[in-house]
Amino acid sequence: MKQSKESVSDVADLRDQLVRSLRAQGFRVRNGAVLPPKDLSKERIRELHETAVAHRIERARDGLFRMEKDLLRHIASGHEVVPSRIFPRLVEVLPDSEEELLFRYASLHWSIPVSSGYARRLRFLVVDEYNGKLIGLIGLGDPVFSLGPRARWIGWTPSDRKKRLGNVMDAFVLGAQRAKRSAESAC
């Protein structure tokens, strides 16, 4: 099948845009290989994710911005946190609920983009019983099923893999929510 000159040009333009974006984020691109930045400190890794986080916030802006004031009431200010009285409670996140909006909103504030997960998913808010405020997020999902190197290393056959991973879930989100600062807002 022949490609038109226009489609070849589109592919080249897309490749150039991708290479420019990668370089702007600090990656090195040489002879078609993408190499990570030399400095991979924790802060540098956060910086590498800034573009993706900003993109996710922008995509969510219209849907969550109108709800921000209501959602912020679920996030503690520093003076509302009493470490000796924290009593965590799990709250299941159901589709189309206020908890789902809060889960999405809180995850937008993390320095690394939060995956939506795939296949089976269970999401939970961790709420402090003492003050009713959000203290963390937990998201569980199906593990990567077809991971050849893992199966070979362990010595699993396809039936072993099915039997062993059928009742396993991986955490795709697991973390604490920090207290809000005055006038803090992501959207």
Image: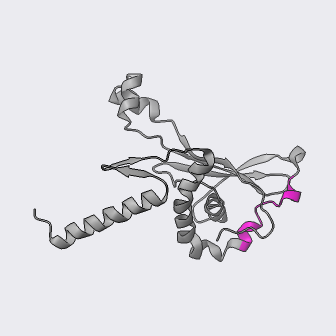
**Please, is residue 92 above or below residue 162 in the view?**
below
User: What segment carries the magenta color?
Assistant: 69-81
Q: Residue at x 33, y 30 (%)?
A: 158
Give 49 or 157, whichever is nearer the viewer: 49
Lateral position of residue 136 relative to residue 55, left or right = right
Q: Which residue is the extreme one toward the left? A: 1
- Quadrant in the rendering for residue 58: bottom right
Percent across and percent down for residue 75 are 76, 61
Percent across and percent down for residue 169 are 53, 40
Residue 83 in view? yes
Give 110 or 63, whichever is nearer the viewer: 110
Quarter of the N terminus within the rendering: bottom left
Residue 113 in view? no
Percent across and percent down for residue 6 are 20, 73
Q: Residue at x 41, y 23 (%)?
A: 154
Lateral position of residue 158 relative to residue 55, left or right = left
Percent across and percent down for residue 33 are 34, 47
Is residue 108 part of the magenta span, yes or no?
Answer: no
Q: Which residue is drawn at 62% across and 72% down?
A: 64
Q: Which residue is drawn at 82% across and 51% down?
A: 129
Lateral position of residue 159 relative to residue 48, left or right = left
**Please, is residue 157 above or below residue 22 in the view?**
above
